[in-house]
Amino acid sequence: MSRIYFDHSATTPLDPRVLEAMLPFLADSFGNASSQHAEGRKARGAVEIARAQVAALLNGDANEIIFTGSGTEADNLALIGAVRESVGPAHVITSSIEHAAILETCRYLEETGVSVTQLPVDSEGLVDSLDLEAALRPETRIVSVMAASNLVGTVQPISELAEITSDHGALFHTDAVQAGGKIPIDVKVAPIDLVSLSAHKLHGPKGIGALFVRHGVELSPMVFGGGQERGLRSATENVAAIVGFGAAAEIARHDLESEAARLGDLREKIVRELAETVPTAYVIGHPEKRLPGHLALGFAGQEVLAGRLVQLLDKAGIAVSAGSACNAHHADKPSHVLLAMGYDAERARGLVRITLGRFNTEAEVDRFGAILPGLVAELNPDLDWTTSPHLAGTALAETTA
Ligand code: PLP
């Protein structure tokens, strides 16, 4: 029986249409996009088409897209680039549940004398705009709040946060690595200055990211060299990966609405079934403001066994994760995201993340629903499910819409 892949927040399989678009640029069309001859012009043309495709995902203009080597690099460029461009003391605001690409960059900035405020979140992972208003200072240079959480799937009110930040005169950045291509983001409507994206989260290739930089926003580069990407990211362009990113962005934009509805339905099906079959399961994150195919679960009384459950699922042919792939090296540590959401240290280790993607089917969801209850029961046979209370999160029965 074939394996089931339910870990799309970690990475996604390459769409065959994306691979097809990339292949010529890994073979005969090998030109350097900065060369003046026909080979170079062909590569340049392909890069510029991809730039427009990625920009369209955000309703931005093509020349507002800077290609980077990853989502991580886009995050670094946004924060470090904005701070280095400013004069005098700098203050950065972020949230306490960001990806390491933001939190570690903030830690680095702190070491260089920048002051950093981490906004709290509520028990469902939402940032409160009043907390942002209270944290803004005259020297605040940039506010960075992720569009959606990689771990719990909660979608932040980024338009509102961007408005507040813009009224204050600071830059607003959002890490949309998880949200890009899954929920609408429109930079013509919301005053968002900087947006990070990564192709491998939307069925594109790994090792290619982008930073949307609004017209007029000044950043300092972090990589120096030949001046490619408007001087903000020197290096010979990775043409095949850029073309793949463009194709992936185009498909994601075209199918965004229908795919969000389809994945939302599959997720609800899992929730409805588990509400019947695994009464200890609870949903972590916001029950409605969430990414469509994202389901973060806890199992009351069995939180310490989440890692074991993920292993059992893997053995049964189903790939899910306990926490984010980036924290896999610290699997024994409680999640900083769940701690920030108010979970205690034990329950903050107990998250099982199921993230659906383009090629998942209802049959796979059914197979998962049939297998999971037995594995949960295997974990801790002594636990009385019927009396074990929901210690945190939202009981599944309350979330089915
Ligand atoms: N930001 C978020 C929210 C992510 O989920 C990830 C990857 O997991 C990144 C940034 C880093 O992106 P990349 O893998 O392209 O470096």
Image (cartoon, helix red, strand yellow):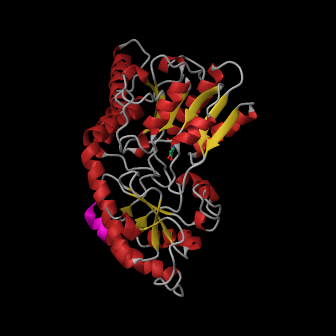
In the rendered view, tell whether residue 339 sits above or below residue 307. above
Quarter of the image with the N terminus is bottom left
The picture places residue 130, in percent across and down from the top left corner, at 55, 41
For residue 364: magenta? Answer: yes
Res. 138 visible in picture: yes
**At 48% across and 27% down in the image, what residue appears?**
193
**At 45% across and 72% down in the image, what residue appears?**
281
In the rendered view, tell whether residue 231 sits above or below residue 288. above
**At 41% across and 29% down in the image, what residue appears?**
239
Q: Nearer the viewer, residue 35 or 115?
A: 115
Quarter of the image with the C terminus is bottom left
Residue positioned most to the top: 36
Question: Which SS does the magenta portion mostly show?
Answer: helix
Q: How many marks?
A: 0
Q: Which image quadrant is residue 270 in?
A: bottom left
Please give left or right for residue 142 compared with residue 53 in the image.
Answer: right
Q: Which residues are magenta?
A: 361-366
The picture places residue 383, in percent across and down from the top left corner, at 53, 84
Res. 208 visible in picture: no
For residue 221: magenta? Answer: no
Q: Nearer the viewer, residue 93 or 214?
A: 93
The picture places residue 207, in percent across and down from the top left corner, at 48, 39
Please give left or right for residue 165 compared with residue 401 in the image.
Answer: right
**At 40% across and 68% down in the image, what residue appears?**
396
The picture places residue 102, in percent across and down from the top left corner, at 59, 40
